[in-house]
Every structure is written in structure tokens, then in C-alpha cells.
Image: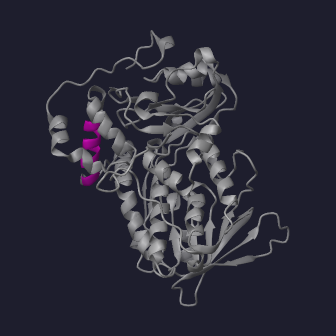
Amino acid sequence: MGTARHMVTRPSRRGRRADAGPPAVPEPDSGDRWGHAVVIGAGFTGLLAARVLAGRFARVTLLERDRLAPGTTHRSGLPQGRHPHGLLARGAAIVEELFPGIRAELAGRGAPVFDFGAGFATRLPHGWAPRGALGVEVQSLDLTTLESALCDRIRAEPAVRIRDGFLAQALELSADRSRAVAVTGRDRDDPGHTPVRIDADLIVDATGRASRLPGWLAAAGLPRPQRRRVASPLVYSSRMYELPNHAAPEWLVSFEMTFPPLVRRGGAAVTVDRGHRLVSVIAPAGELPPPRAEAALREFAGTLHNPHFAHVMEHGRPVTPVYRCPVGGNQWIRYHRLRRFPDRLLVLGDAFCAFNPVYGQGLTVAALQAHLLGLLLRRADDPAGVARRFQRQAARIVLFPWLTATAADQGWSRTGPGPALSCVRAFLHLVVRRVPGDPALYAEFARVQNMLASPLRLLRPSLLIRLLRPRGTAAAGAPPGLDEAAGHSPG
């Protein structure tokens, strides 16, 4: 969870800054465009993929099982759309390059832009993160608003056709099963269930955690990919509130981090426009009150170290019901390890590797994969071979986010992590333990968290010396930006 985060950087005299995000992918000449690409799934990942493919293919068809009504209505295929999501600074930079002006457009829809260090209040396991400007501009919004804005842009792409209400049911391969050639399915509203075949020169699976591709491969006589899972028992309970001006806090996003087994509960409060806060509390399923038990939910929020969630619940007017949804844990389907994988078929986003959304990594990883796809397409003479190269390089993109998310979530497991994850977990715990008392360390940690810098940056000798130097644990401190919460005793 978290907020959409953007960073504006400029090229240095020696060239583009390493933390400025990847360069935009130039458009090919119209004469260089290929045939037909098909994207299955019109969520955030599929919309980015369609934008990238529209720069290389003459036609792009975007298939979506839900009906995509105009506006910002929630859709049934996105059950987590009513809960907070995070687009980290690196991902936001890619989205802005693919859809120029999208940040300003979202701001016009009520999504505030602010400095991450000043407007973000974070309660870590051992205290509050330091407050103060970091020079990183961020933007908070909800996922439905983001997808709606991107979908409007995609509808305006001449090469793209959105076919909503379409159920993709199978994948067709060539006779020797060496390449994908078509998607078959049917229109949801067709009473006769007439089968439809859509031929393609490249097929992208962007259907998220519910992807049926492993079964489609098995049905075609190909091996199923290995699936790695690290479970999380966490569940969201989320609700939108409208706050009157006199009760509006100075923070724009507030967060309490879980770190099992030390911290089992957490939450987030995200400003989606100046008057509305989307509040979510999270805990293992057996510890959260039922959605309709409003008094019990407020009481639960009061047990957290972060008082901001209880403040919004007390002073705000509910504008939605309470929505509850499992977090979903971590899952990596290792397509890149398959020896026999059809050419011209590739997998992006949660359909490839899905993370516990509490850590806010999924959207940014999907954006990085879309950017990678654009680079590979630009360098290729035709679609042949792109899928294999993409899947192997996409695995490198997900490696560090996977290690950090699963190292934290191994705290839920009774068996404990292996040696590699144990080292990652111990180092992560050391960092978050020291951050409350070290603003300079927090500035570095925030850049890594936003994927503006590699996690290896935290292993620099100067930082390691500071991390390993004996010192007392920083005091938990008072909750920032909430005078009304005086008397609340943070743990």
C-alpha cells in the first residue's frame, strides 16, 4: 500500500541521471509497424502493455472480461480496487513517459501532489519515520481513478481496439506447438456462446493473479511452470470517508507497517482528493472484526500505534460501505525457467509475479516490465524471439522486490526462511529499526523503497558502518500531524 510517487529529475552534464528512471521508448516510423498484437486483461498492466505495443504494431486488441463503463466505476474483476494501492516513484516516471501529462490530469481529478518526506507519515515497527522534505514529489490516488484515466488515453490510440465483455478461454498454438498464434473465447452477452478466434502475431497475458495460462499450456501438452508461493494471512477492511475542513490533518498519506511476527497489524489512510480519505486496516483474518461491526472496527483501529486511522473514522463521514478482501500473498510463476515455452507469448505483471500489496511494489514492477517490453520491441526486427528475451529479463526485474516481500512475509511461516531469505530479513529488520532515529538513512531507504535506487545502495560501506555501529533503539516518538490525538499513547 502507499501512494503514487513521482520524481522529477534532469539529465546531468554527463548524461542521464541513474535515478531518473528509464528513458522513453521512441516511436518507430509508421512503415516499420508489424501486424496484430493481442493483450488479455485491461487493468493497469494491460493498459501499459497496449500503449507500448501501439508504438510497434499496426493493430492492438485489448481483451477484457468486464464491461468497461465510462467514468471511474469499480469493476468486478478488480476486487482490490476498493483498497489502497501504491505506484512508486520509478513506476510513476514510466507511466508519465508513456502517457505524457497524466500526473497533471490526475491532479485535476483531485489527486494531490506533495513531497514524500513531508506529506507521508509512516509508523515503522520501532517508531515513526523522520519527517521533512526529501525532494521526491509524490501523488496519492486510488487505483480505479488511475485505471480510468489510462483507459481514456488508450481509447484515443488509433491502433488500439478495446473489446470488453470478452471471455478468453484458450490459447491456440502452431502445429508444432512452438509459437502462439491465436486466442479463442466468446462474448459474454452472446446467448449462443459462439466461439471467437482472434489471430495474433504477439499475445500478452496481463490477467493478473487469476491468469489461466498455466492450464492453457497444460491443455496444449506443454509442461506447467513451477509456482513459488509465500503466503500471507492478512486481510483488508477498507472504507472511504469525507473529512470536514476543520478535521483535515496536515498529512496526506499515513501508513503503519506490518513486520511479522513482531507487528501483526497495520493500516493505511490515503488522500484520494482533498476531502476524502481511503482508510484500510489490515490484520490476519481472525483478528479483524466483521465489516458491518462499525464500532468494533473503530475500536480495532484504536489499538494500532498509528492514531490517524481512528481519527479519520471518528471525525469523517462514511461515503462507502466497509469492503473486505484478502491480501493475496506472494506468487511467482517461473515461466522463464521453462525449456519449452511458445514464442510470441509473454506474461506481465501479477500474472507473472504477484506481491503482497502491503509493500506497494506490484504496479511499479508491472511498469518496469512494460518499459522493458518497449525496449525489446524497438530493438527487434520482428516479433520472433522477443518473448524468450523478455521473460528472462523480466525475472531479473522481480528478483529484488520478491526477496524483500517474501523475506518480510516469512515471519508468518512456522518453518522459517532459508539461509538467503534469513539474511535479507535480518538486514531489513536492522534498517527499519534504525530509520526512526536517522533521517539520512531514511532518505536512502525511501529512495530504495521507491525503486529510484537499487537495494544494493544500502550496502555501501558508509551506510553499513552506521547500521552496524552500536547505539540504542530510537524512541518511538509522538505521532506526527495530529494534535487531536494528544493523549493517545503510541507503542
Direction bottom: furthest residue: 175
**286 relative to 215, above or below:** above
Q: Main secondary structure of the magenta part?
A: helix
**358 relative to 200, above or below:** above
Which residue appears at 85% of the width and 72% of the height? 192
Tell me if residue 5 can be seen.
yes
What quarter of the picture does the C terminus occupy? top left
Front-most of residues 227 and 19: 19
| Residue 196 is one of the magenta-drawn residues | no
Tell me if residue 329 can be seen.
no
Position in image of residue 258 (x %, y %): 41, 35
Which residue appears at 31% of the width and 51% of the height? 454
Q: Which portion, as a residue range, is magenta?
A: 420-431
Direction top: furthest residue: 487
Position in image of residue 488 (x %, y %): 45, 13
Residue 317 shown left or right of residue 463 in the figure: right
**43 relative to 74, above or below:** below
Position in image of residue 289 (x %, y %): 58, 29
Residue 273 shown left or right of residue 254 in the figure: right
Which residue appears at 49% of the width and 56% of the height? 367
Position in image of residue 436 (x %, y %): 30, 27
> Residue 163 is drawn in which quadrant?
bottom right
| Residue 430 is one of the magenta-drawn residues | yes
